[in-house]
Amino acid sequence: MRDMQISPDHPLLLRIVDDIATRGWSQQNIFLPERLTRELAAECRKRAAEGELTPAGVGRGPGQEVHEGIRGDHIQWLEPGQAEPCDAYLNLMDSLRQALNRGLFLGLEEFESHFALYPPGAFYLKHLDRFRDDDARTVSAVLYLNDAWLPEHGGQLRMYLEGETSYDVQPTGGCLVVFLSGDMPHEVLPATRERLSLTGWFRRRSGELF
Ligand code: OGA
Ligand code: MN
């Protein structure tokens, strides 16, 4: 996994770009090699055991508050240079950022992401990832790190599509879901077991607010 790099014209990335262009979201069930998925899951569990994950807040900036009735996950933001598997993931996401920019001219400049651990019973109510007062978050990417997930474990990502339809993604290890942050309402259903993921956002420069 040392120098894992993938080119922005890799067919897997081009498929994601094409899905985003045609329907605003993409699901890739086999995005990550199993070994990297396992290493990232181990890193997430290690950080959780060391008490580095903290209850996620709702909202943005100083007004942010913890509301377990809205979202009950525990998170830690990633920084480059902390752990090899995390850097491999950040490199992959940077290739995806370049692919999205080349294919869709999105002008994505940064990627921010965090580990998320949902304890059994935790959920995240229906929401959009784009904040009302900050439109920098443009594309969301959720990567799952769970071994042998079964539908009866719950914990699906429910995506609300056009019209009355919704679609449930099983949070199975190695699966990546990418969607337009401002367009796709979604929620995380409660699970009967711990649910691990890496969630991130490609950002462009924020529109001027004042
Ligand atoms: C989020 C989110 C989805 C998931 O963190 O904003 O919607 O499936 N996560 O974990
Ligand atoms: Mn979300």
Image (cartoon, rainbow, N blue to C red):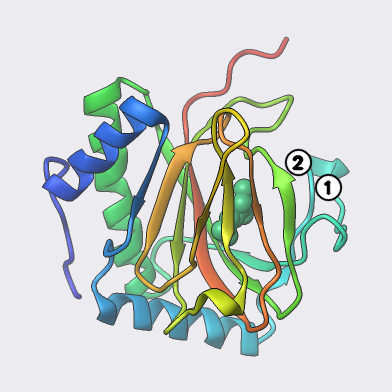
Residue in front for this viewpoint, 85 or 14 = 14
Q: Residue at x 69, y 32 (%)?
A: 131
Residue 91 vs residue 71: left or right? left
Pointer 1 residue Cβ closer than 8 Å to ligand 1? no
In terms of secondary structure, where does tag 2 sit? loop
Q: Are marks 1 and 2 in contact (CB under 8 Å)?
A: yes
- 107 shown above or below 61: above
Q: In which quadrant of the rendered image does the N terminus lie? A: bottom left
Which of the 4 quarters of the picture holds residue 206? Answer: top right
130 up-or-down from 121: above or below: above
Say the numbered circle drawn on residue 64.
1
Q: Nearer the viewer, residue 130 or 90?
A: 130
Disc 1 from disc 2: Cα separation: 5 Å
Q: Quadrant of the C terminus?
A: top right
Label 1 sits on what residue type?
Gln
Mark 1, other Cα within 10 Å: few <14 / some 14–19 / many ≥20: few
Residue 60: quadrant of the picture: top right
What kind of element bears circle 1?
loop
Q: Nearer the viewer, residue 66 or 81?
A: 66
